[in-house]
Image (spheres, grey):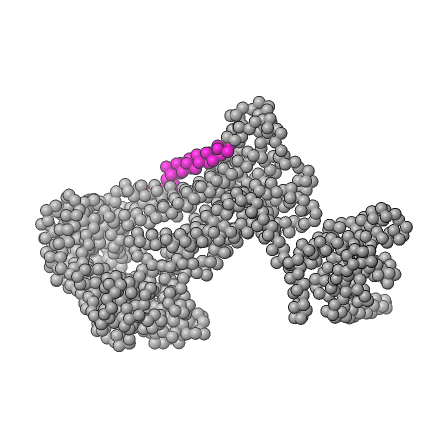
Amino acid sequence: MRPEHWLFTIPLRLRSLFRWAQADQELDDELRDHLERKAGEYVAQGMTQEEAHRRARLDMDGIEQTKEKCRDARRVNWIQDLIKDLRYGLRMLRQNPGFTAAAVLAIALGVGINVGIFSVLNGLALRLLPVPRAEQVVSVEQIFHGKFLRNAVNGGSLSSYSEYLNYRDNDHVFSGLLAYEPFVHATLGGGEMRELLGATTSCNYFDVLNEHPSQGRGFVASDCAAPGENAVVVISDELWRGTFAGDPSLVGKTIILNRTEYTVVGIAPQGFRGTEPIPSSFWAPITMQTVLEPGSDSLTADNLGWLALLGRVRPGVTMEQVRSDLGVIAGQMDQLHPGRKTSLAIRRATFIDRQMELEHLIPVASVILTAFGLVLLVACANVANLLLARASVRHKEIALRLSIGASRWRLVRQLLTESLLLSLIGGALGSVLAFWSFTGITRLVISHSPIPVAFNVVPDFRVLTYALALTLITGIAFGLIPALQSSRLDLNTALKEDGAHSGSGKRSGRFLRNALVGTQVAVCMVLLLAAGLLLRGLYQAQRVDPGFEIKGVATTVLNLMGQGYDENRAAAFVRELREQIAGLPSVTDVAQAECAPLSHDFRGGLFTAPGRPDKVWAYYDHVSPEYFSLVGIPIVRGRGFLPGETHDAPGVIATEATARRLWPGDDPLGKTLREGLPASQTAKAPLGGREYTVIGVAKDAQVAHLGELNEPYLYFPAGPQDNLRIYILVRYAGGFPPIAKGIREAVQSLDKDMPVDVTRLEDYLEVWRMPSRIVAALSGALGALALILASIGVYGVVSYSVSRCVREIGIRMALGADNREIMNLVLSQSMRPVLIGGLVGVAGCAAVSQVLSSMLFGASAHDPIAFISVPLFLLVVALLASYIPARRAIRVDPMVALRYE
Amino acid sequence: MSKPSDLVQGTLDMLLLKILALEPMNGFAVSQRLKQVSGDILQVSDGSLYPALHKLEQEGWITAEWKTSEYGRRAKYYSLTRLGRRQLEKEADNWGRLSSAIARVIKLKEA
C-alpha cells in the first residue's frame, strides 16, 4: 500500500478497533434495512406483506453467517481479536476467583523457582564481568592436543609467562591483554594475622579492565620492570574498610604479606572484587610472584601454565579475527614443541569461563535446571487439570459458539489466550517473588558456606527473557491440550445435554485427566526417590568406616616455605615442634605427613611397573614412620618405615589396592615401580622418574577420597624436603580445646608470626559430606514441593470425579450398594493412575540413579530401603488425598442425588 | 446465467466500485443496479454483497454515511472515495488487459 493510503486508513482501522459495539449495531441495522427493501420489492411484485417478508428472510438465509463474514471483513488485524480475547479472558478469570487463585499460585510457584535458580546460574556463569564495556573483554585459554608435556597450576588451560608475553607483543586485535595468577594465598602480618586471597597481575591489569583505583593509583609499567623488586600492592575496598578501618592515610603506608613489606599504592574502587568468583583482597605485580610464593619461580618456567589471560578487543574487531590472529601466534609456538597442537578457547569473560570450570559446571547446572523444571511440569499438570474441569462446565457455551459459526481454530485461539493470560499473571507474580527471595536466600547460603563466593543474582535482561519465555511456554504447555480437547465437541449431544448428565466426562477427557495425574505422581516419585537415596548416602557417610582411626586426632598444616623458611630451618622447626608437642600432657602420638587423610590436599602421579605397558595413576603421601600407628592403618605384609629412612630411600609402601592394580595375583614385596614423569619445574613434585622397591603393604583406607575403596595409593618416607609444607598429626586423649591451645602455643613459641590453625581430623568428614547434604536438601525441598502440588492435583481430580458422578453414586446406593462398595469404587478408580504413575517414576529413577552414585558414599544406587519406603510414603499420601474427597461420595443421599441437576 | 460469485473476489470488488462511481447508493440498490445494467446476468447474493462492501470500506475505497431513507428509517449510503476511484481505474486497466489477452487466445485458429 502506498504511504498516503495507509495513513488514510488508520482512522478507519482505529474506529473499527474502538467502536466495535457500535459497528455491530450498525451492521444489524444495515441488514434489516436490506430485508425491508427486499420485502418491498416483493410487495411491488404483488405478494402480501407477510409473504413478502417471509420470502425476503428466506432469501437472506444464513443472516448470522453473513454478519460473521462482515465482521471478518472489517477485522483490522489480529490485534483486534487479541484485545477482544483478552477482555473476555479477564472477565472469565474475575468471575471464577477460586479457580484463578489456585491456577495462579501453582504457576507462580513453578515459574518462580525456575527463574530464581536461573538467576543464580546467570550470576555465576553467564553475566559478563562487572567492568565498563565488559562485552569487549574476552578470556583466552590454550587447549593442547597431540603429544605434549605440560605442568600446570590451577588448571590445564592456563598460560605461561613467556606465552603471555608472546601473545601480548604480537597480537593485532587487542587494545590490551592482561595476565593474572588467581588464588594467591598470603598471610597478612601485623598485630592480627589474617589469611587473604588475592592475585598477582600484569601491570596493565587495571588499565585493560578500565577500573581505576578510588584512591592512589594502579600499576605502572615500571612496577613490573624487574622480578622481585617493586613491592607494591593495591588492596580491595572491602579489605580497606574492614581490616584497616577505612584509614584515610593508608595509601603510601606499608603492609606485610607473607613476611615481606609491600607499599600500598592504591585502593580498588568499591565493589570491584577481581575477576574470579571468589573475591580478591589484594593485587600485586606479577614480578612479585617469587617473593609471594617462595620456592617457586613461575616467571621463568616456560612450560608451566599458571596465568589466566583477559584481553580487551579493539572496537570493530570480530571474534573470528581474534581467533585467527591468536591462532597464528599459537601455531608458531607449537613449532617449538613438535607433535603438539594448540587450539584456543576464546570466550566473552564471565566469572566462570575457564574450560575446566565449565566442564564441571555444565553437567551440574543441567541436572539442577531439569529438576526444577520437573516441578514446573507438575504445576502445569495441575493447572491443565483445573482447566479441563472448568472446560466441561463451559461446554454449553463452547457448543453454542461453535454452532453459530465460530471456527474451531478461533475458539482454540481464545482458550489459549485465556491460558496465556493466566500464565502471564502467574509468571509475573512468581518472578517478582523469586527476585525478592533469591537475593536473600543466596546471601544466606553464601554467609554459611566456607567459600566466600560472590556473585550477582540481581535480574538482568537474560533473566527477564528467560522468565518471559518460560511463562509463555508454560501457558502453551498447560493450555493447548485442554483447548484442543474442549473445542472438539459433538455439537448434538453437547447442546442437548442437561447439566449433570455428562457423567464423569467423556472417555477421552477422563483419560487425559488420569494421564496428567499419573505424570504428576511419576515426577514426584523421581524427585523424592533421589532425595531418599541421597539421605541414605548421608546416613551411610555417618557410619562409614574410612578404614582408619579418624577420631581423636588433631591436625595443623604449616606452610613453612611460604613463610620464607628453607629446608634446614624448616627441618629444625619441625623437629623442635614435634618434641614440644610430644611433651604436652594429653598427647599420645605425633606424626607428620605431606597430606593429612581426607584433607582435600592431594598429591598424585603416574607410575609404571616393569613389564606393564600402561601407566597407573596413584595418589601418594610422604609420611613419618609413626603415621601408620597414629592413624590406625595396619601394615599387613612386610614392614613400615624405619626412623632412618627418609625421602631419598628407595622403599615405598603400597596399599592392597595398588598391589592389585600393578601386580595382580602376585606378591608385591620386592617389586619395583617407577614414577612416570620427568622432574617438574616446581618444588612441589620432585619424585623425578626414580625407581622404588615395595617394602611393605598397608591395608586399604579411604584417605584420599571418601567413599572410594579401590584407589591405588602409595606411601613414601618423609624427608627434609617434606618439611616445607607439612601436616602435623597429633593423637590426644581428653578434650580438644586444651590440645588445640597447646599446639598453637607450641608453634608460636617457636615463631610468633607463624599462622596456625588447629582442627580435628574428623571435621574433614563434614567437608566431604557437604555436597551430598546440599543436594539432598535441594532434592528434598523440590520433592516436597512436587508432593504438595501432586497431592492437590490428586485431591482436585478425585473431588471433581465424585461431583460428576453424584447421580451414578445415588443410583448405586438406591440399588443397594453399601458405603464400603462405593468407597472401593471411587478409590480404585482414582488410585489407578497414581499406581501407574508411581511405577513409571520408580522405573525412571532406577534408570538414572547411577548419576548420583558419586554422592552416595558407597550406598547402592538401587538401595532397597529407599526404593521401598519412598514409594510407600507417596502411596499413603496419595491415598489420603483421594480418601478425603471420596468420603463425600458416601454421604450422598440417594434421593437428593437422583434429582440432582 | 453466471453469478458474480463464480468470479474471483477481485472482479466483484471492481464491479461494486464501478456501480458506486455512478452515484452514491445503499447496499440493496447496488445489487439491484448491477443486476439491471448487466441484463440480469450479474447477480450478487446477499451473503457475498455485504462482506464485500465492508471490505471495500475497510480498505478506504468507499465511504459510508447514515442518512434517513425514503422509508423513514436510517440507511447506510456508500460512495466512492478518491482512493477508490484510483483503485477502480487500476483494476479496470488490469481487467482490460486480461480480457483482451483471453480473447486473443480463444480466437486462435484451430488446425
Q: Is residue B39 visible?
A: yes
Q: Nearer the viewer, residue A491 or A548?
A: A491
**Residue A616 shows in the view:** no
In this rendering, position of residue A788 left or right of residue A544: right
Whether residue A865 appears in magenta in the rendering, the answer is yes
Q: Which residue does the image show at 25% across and 61% down from the upper left? A: A242
Front residue of this view, candidates A448 and A139 = A448
Q: Which residues are magenta?
A: A858-886
Residue A630 position in % (x across, y down): 16, 47
For the N terminus of chain A, the quadrant is bottom right
Outermost residue toward the right? Answer: A46
x, y percent for residue A661 = 28, 50
Q: Residue at x 67, y 65 (%)?
A: A9
Counting from the top left corner in percent of width and height, residue A287 is at 25, 71
**Is B14 drawn above or below residue A529 in the view shown?**
below
Q: Main secondary structure of the magenta part?
A: helix
Name the quadrant containing residue B80.
Answer: bottom right
Residue A180 lies in quadrant: bottom left
Foreground pick, A371 / A877:
A877
User: Which corner quadrant holds the C terminus of chain A?
Assistant: top right
Residue lying at 25% horizontally and 65% vertically, measured from the top left:
A246
In terms of depth relative to the viewer, which is nearer, A851 or A96?
A: A96
Residue placed at 81% from the left, 66% from the top?
Answer: B23
**Badge count:** 0
Asked if residue A7 lies in the magenta stretch, the reply is no
Q: Position of residue A225 (x, y in %)?
A: 25, 76
- A390 to the left or right of A464: right
